[in-house]
Amino acid sequence: MEVPCDASYQTTFSVSVCSECRFNLPHFKLITKDMAKKTFLLPDSSLEVLPCLRKANPKHEGFAQLRLYLTQACQAAAIQLHGSLDNIADEKRRRERARYDKAVQRTKSVVEVFGKRRKGKLGAPGGKPARRMPPPEDEDHKHIFKEPLQQDDGSWVKECACGLSVTFHKM
């Protein structure tokens, strides 16, 4: 009894495989270009030389065609590029660690800037650094403002003895 080979695999990948093996064996499965890049860390230049099966994009007919690669061919190209599958796993861990370290550094810099602003080391753009208000000693404190002073920009400022200052514009 002779089992017919899958014609699309024979013409595209030059591999003789029956339909049953094609669906059951993992190295005969088809993977997308994106999955090949993520799984085997293959650059576009390596994928360009590999044979691929092109199909219409299922998301939208106007989108670019899907490029489906044979897992076995991608694995062979990755081993040729990286040396072994263990080296690929090590490279994935290294890249993940670098991505994590970069995110931590980015978060630290954002938190540092935010902390400086809260401490009053950085003021508003073009303004004075923010002052920390002394805590009121008396809970029944009533603000007693000095005479308002006119600023260069036309606004007026009045200050209380407790350190509170109010900026306003006269109409």
Image (cartoon, rainbow, N blue to C red):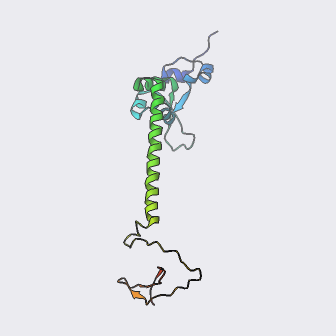
Q: Nearer the viewer, residue 22 or 116?
A: 116
Q: Quadrant location of the C terminus? A: bottom left
Q: Is residue 126 above or below residue 60?
A: below
Tell me the residue at 54%/24% (across/down): 8
Q: Position of residue 161 (x, y in %)?
A: 47, 83
Residue 141: where, in percent of width, then height? Answer: 56, 83
Q: Residue furthest left?
A: 152
Residue 70, x across and y down, in percent: 51, 26
Residue 156 falls in image quadrant: bottom left
In the rendered image of this protein, does residue 140 appear above or below residue 112? below
- Considering depth in this image, is 91 or 73 the residue closer to the camera? 91
Q: Residue furthest top?
A: 1
Q: Residue at x 57, y 20 (%)?
A: 6
- Name the residue at 47% across, 65% down: 118
Residue 158, given in percent of the width and then of the height, sits at: 45, 85
Count up the numbered dots: 0
The image quadrant where one finds the N terminus is top right
**Which corner quadrant of the image does residue 94 belong to?**
top left
Residue at coordinates 57% horizontally, 17% vertically from top-left?
5
Please determine whether, in this image, residue 85 is positioned above or below residue 118: above
- Given residues 15 and 98, the one toward you in this image is 98
Q: Residue furthest front?
A: 137
**Is residue 48 depicted above or below 102 in this figure?**
above
